[in-house]
Image (cartoon, grey):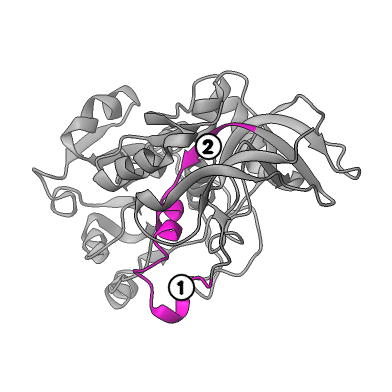
Amino acid sequence: MSNLMKAVRLHAFGGPEVLVYENAPKPELQPGEVLVRVHAIGVNPPDLYLRDGYRTLPPEWRPDASFPLILGTDISGVVDDLAADVDDFSAGDEVYAMVRFPEGVMTGGGAYAEYVSVPASQLALKPTGIDHVRAAGVPMSLLTAWQFLIELGHHEPNPFQSFAHEPVPLEGKTVLINGAGGGVGHLAVQLAKWKGARVIAVASSKNETLMRDLGVDQFIDYTKVAADEAVRDADLVLDAVGGKHMERFLSSLKPGGALFLVNPLGFTGQEKADALGIKVSSTQVRSNGAQLAGAAPLLSDGTIRPIIDSSFRLSDAASAHQRAADGGIQGKIVLIAD
């Protein structure tokens, strides 16, 4: 049996063209790990940031990489082998996972490959009602939405604030989701509806049909209407976009409401939020096999539907990254490894 596999590796930081499809050593199992034969891989923003060397960060925060490295965290595939101390899975099980996040954020999670080793605690059985492509598009985006809206699921220190993030009750509440057409946003819409919220989706016009299909109660095309001016007295705003002027959404919230920021860097409205009694909170998504297992029935029965923007062969990962750079993504981009 060969100890080599095909993988997409980086030998230097840069644009999509630095992604090289080549032979690489197959991972060696460590205690507590499962070797997965990968069928599909989800493409996520941290993949793009790492490929680029995190150039938007201050120099002292950028990764001191040891090349070559393999990007990626989100996988769906089949169990190929198990460490001797793993008894929760069996060879041949179809599984999905977000691999080593955030611990691998600066070194890569190893997912852009034919095989990846996964800590068993980060792995879950793949939902039976969806294929590997859709399952691979789920983990990071769903876990982000789940940990913001449903259950944090861990006690690790919060890198963004001095207190632990706490989801708020959603039943009967009005929830505005900014960036509703994206990977996190379209799943957050569905989780909020599942929990009984009235959902206002903010996205571009091309997403309106999808948002209506997902059951949103109000759709706002941000290219025509400023959501922060059109909405008042929401109980919760989940901003899945970030960037400049996140504080504008404080005016959309009722006093005592909550503003959840998926990417809080650059938020400048804390003083105003305090004056209004609005809770501003963020958290770092973390790998969690138990939460993926809990979400699996919702994915299998169609309560939550992952939307795939586009798919590419693993060998054409550069084109997938270029698609991500082009923007206007609806749902997720996925690489197919088989």
- Outermost residue toward the bottom? 60
Q: Is residue 75 visible?
A: yes
Query: Which label belongs to residue 41?
Result: 2
- Outermost residue toward the left? 224
Q: Read off the magenta span.
A: 38-64
Query: Which label belongs to residue 62?
Result: 1
Residue 44 lies in magenta, yes or no? yes
Q: Position of residue 114 (x, y in %)?
A: 62, 36
| Residue type, mark 1 in image | Arg
N-terminal of the pair, mark 2 or mark 1, is: 2
**Image height of 100 relative to 140, above or below:** below
Q: Name the residue: 86% across, 43% down.
A: 83
Quarter of the view holding residue 116: top right
Q: Name the residue: 47% across, 47% down.
A: 20
Q: Is residue 237 visible?
A: no
Relative to residue 34, is residue 229 drawn left or right? left
Q: Secondary structure at mark 1?
A: loop
